[in-house]
Amino acid sequence: MTTYTLKLDPIIKLTEDQFYQLCQENPDMKLERNHKGELVIMPPTGGGTGKRNFEIATDFGIWNRQSQLGICFDSSTCFKLPNGGDRSPDVAWVKKERWDALTPEKQEKFPPIAPDFVLELMSPSDILKDVQNKMQEYMDAGVKLGWLLDRKTHRVEIYRQGRGVEVLENPTQLSGEDVLPGFILNLQVVWE
């Protein structure tokens, strides 16, 4: 399956509310907008990716319940990023005090906030350059730490604010560093 990008400008410029309504009227489609306002239509994941996404999200959820430092989000959550994109990372995390600063109305729709952490797990149909561009878009929006996991090559790209991308070949675990204190992701669930 292929991801499609529709260039809407200059034909139409969807407002925040119109994009939200478009997503609500088409719940079977996964829609995002990049920072240029282009509509991105993504296929659903297959079983292999879905299984791994669930295992990763479970690890984050357990750590977050114990630490109570923030709020975890799954891949169906779309964030309205400060740079204009509307993106749904596979896993996202926001510090509790930043989340609590949003009104209940802003929390309910597409939260207008850049997560502190994002994770993208590549699906077999993903194009590496497209996902790398998405990761850079997250960093440009203010995300502090991001992980791009390529299960096919067992490669991890670590994105940090103000630093170059670090590439790891076949790591066994990842540390949440100071963004996710005490969190360790065992990559066996991704690589198996």
Image: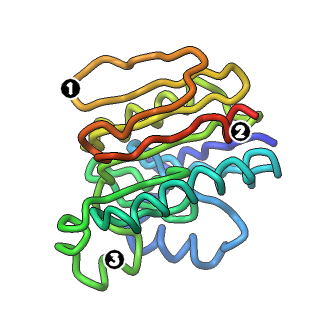
Q: Is residue 97 left or right of residue 36?
A: left
Q: Splitting the image into 4 quarters, where does residue 190 fall?
A: top right
In this view, the residue in front, 40 or 129, is 129
Residue 108: x and y in percent read: 39, 80
User: Horizontal placement of 151 versus 164: left or right?
Assistant: right
- The residue lying at 48 percent from left, 67 percent from top is 19
**Residue 157 position within the rendered picture, expressed as x and y whole percent measured from the top left:** 48, 24
Question: What residue is drawn where x is 53% and y is 25%?
Answer: 156
Mark 1 burial class by Cα count in 10 Å: few <14, some 14-19, many 20+: few
Amino acid type of the residue that numbered disc 2 sits on in the rendered structure:
Ser
Q: Secondary structure at mark 2?
A: loop
Which label is found at residue 162? 1
Which amino acid type is shown beneath numbered disc 3? Gln
Q: Residue at x 73, y 25 (%)?
A: 152
Percent across and percent down for residue 49 are 73, 46
Label 3: few (<14), some (14–19) or many (≥20) C-alpha neighbours in 10 Å = some
CB under 8 Å between discs 2 and 3: no
Point out the image quarter for the N terminus. Answer: top right
Disc ID at residue 123: 2
Foreground: 130 or 177?
A: 177
Mark 2 Cα-neighbour bin, 10 Å: few <14, some 14–19, many ≥20: some
Q: Is residue 152 above or below residue 187?
A: above
Q: Measuring 51% from the left and 31% from the top, which residue is drawn there?
A: 173
Label 2 to label 1: alpha-carbon separation:
27 Å
Residue 41 percent location from the top left of the image: 65, 52
Name the N-terminal-most of marks 3 and 1. Answer: 3
| Three-letter code, disc 1 | Gly
Give the alpha-carbon distance from disc 3 to disc 1, as whole Å: 28 Å
- Residue 81: name its quadrant: bottom left
**Disc on res. 107:** 3
Local secondary structure at mark 3: helix
Q: Which mark sits nearer the N-terminus, 2 or 1?
A: 2
